Image: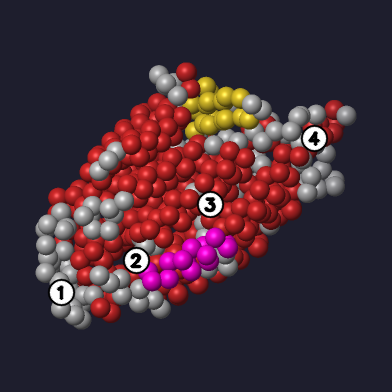
Amino acid sequence: MYFPVNPWPEAAAFPVLTAMTLTPLAAMVGVLCSRSLTAALRFGFAGTSLTVLLSIYLLVVFDSEVSGINLFEQANFAGLSYTVGVDGVNILFIPLTAVIAFLVLLYTFSHAQNRYRDRFYVVSVLGYETVLIGAFASLNVMQFWIWSVLELVPVVYLTLHSGTGLRRRWAVDRFLQYWLSGFLMTLTGFLLLAFGLIDSEHPLTFDWLTIKQNNAYLHDEALIFVLLFYGFAIRMPLFPFHGWLPVLAEHGTVASCAIFLVGLKLGIFAVLRFILPILPGVAEDWAGLVLTLALISTFYGAVMALLQINIRRLLAFAVLSQTGILVIGLFCFNDFGLEGSIMLSVAYGLATAGMLFSVGLIYERTGTALMPRLGGLFDSNLTLGMLFLVSSLSTLVKPGTPGFDATHLIIEGTIEEYGWLLAIAILTGNLLAAAFILWAFQRIFLASSKRFAQPYSSLHHPVLKERLITVVICLLLIGTGFYMRPWLRLVDQDASMITKGYPIHSSMPHGQPAEEPQPDEIRPEDEQL
């Protein structure tokens, strides 16, 4: 099947995706060459700011009326292929990465005199941004895999160097156990994809477009699906592959966790890019098992979040519960579910990052992330309270937030494909999410304080930069919530292309099974024969 591809010179003045990948990389060089932390932060801030501007330009030149790959770039050298492009699947994840990286550096500016004294901390954040943008833009399976493996470097460094837990090394060991097994599975799956095209008279290639257009020649499709989904389920994470996330959230650094949350959406993106378009029939066959894991993830994550006293672990289990809802949307096999999952992934990424920033700034003041030791912080920390409240409401399907329309799309897609029972289960999971998120807000900000509050010092906690973080996140959440249509238009065309590729569901009008002709019925084409 032909897949439209539009080269970058047709829409942009320069290869914007490569520029976005190289900009934080160039800032990294500047940071390494600098001799002071102040100069390093300035280089970092300049790099992330320019990347945000490039992401705005990316949204402007992206043609939402044309399906297929926009701003396509390809280069071959030394037998290797570099291929990037953007479509409705990844167009929102790349700007989200740029914004969160900018806010992480702004957070670092606010606390440069505390624990972030090392230039390599700034280098790690910039490197993380480079890796995520490169991975989200990749149209080559091995290119995507290499970027994913490189993500280990900043995650491990930031956890060991700037983490706040006492068992950071143990947390990193647990993290590596899960992720390395996932990388091994995805590598095996990608190799099977590439070697599966030998019968199509194509040379060995890892090009996504070539694999997608010749997926009919693939062998062992069920095995490939299991290998890829296992690896991506660790990244999301999905039950029961989540054991590393609460541990890393508890012992890592809050600032790095914010951008790390965007990295988790790489798992959702990978299913959208490398499973659903390439293995649509197998995805339909395995939907029952996937939905079972997603439902367990939704309710298990919500119940475990209710049992936590550490706010970081609570947010980690909240991500687990959210992932279950996103996966259900992906496997609805219709436009509603697919568009809803993409939009909700972006909303969850931004909203959960907002809650993490709020929790991190609270930790800087109080020295604890344990909710029983907190309380009564709303009056003295109004900005942080509002950031946490607006961000939490954005995850709870409240009107005026992006999660409202996105979740309703998933509900509509679920009803169309599976009926009301599963839709009610999703709404029940969201009700549990409201319980643990609002309960955490009440314990941290509204309940009476359980301990003597440390005096507020504007010297160590610059109010202006904290307010800037709050304003940026709240404006993005509320603005997209009230004006969702332009963002949905960005993903609509390509979501439809994916759903048209399902061998069973593409022939079902409105999600209903196609009627088979009765034996005594004579079709017009039969008369002609």
Q: Secondary structure at mark 3?
A: helix
Is residue 174 within the magenta segment? yes
**Numbered circle sitting on residue 267:** 3
Q: What x and y, as percent, mark residue 416?
A: 56, 54
First reached walking from the N terminus: tag 4 or tag 3: 4
Residues under numbered marks 2 and 1 in contact, where contact means CB atoms less than 8 Å apart: no
Q: Residue at x 14, y 50 (%)?
A: 464
For residue 109, which numbered disc appears in the image? none
Query: Is 230 positioned to the left or the right of 354 in the image?
Result: right
Measure the C-alpha gap from mark 3 to mark 1: 40 Å
State which mark lies toward you, 3 or 1. Answer: 1
Rendered residue at 47%/18% (across/down): 9
The residue indicated by pointer 2 is: 164
Give the dominant element type of the magenta stretch: helix, strand or loop.
helix
Lower sequence index among marks 4 and 1: 4
Report the front residue among 335 and 47.
Answer: 47
Q: Pointer 4: what residue?
A: 198
Q: Earlier in the sequence, mark 3 or mark 1?
A: 3
* Residue labelled with disc 1: 453
User: Magenta region: which residues?
Assistant: 164-178
Q: CA distance from mark 2 to mark 4?
A: 50 Å
4 and 3 marks in contact (CB < 8 Å) = no
Instruction: Give percent across and percent down for residue 514.
Output: 70, 47
Q: Secondary structure at mark 2?
A: loop
Q: Amino acid at mark 1?
A: Ala
**Is 355 placed above or below 5 here?**
below
Name the N-terminal-most of marks 2 and 3: 2
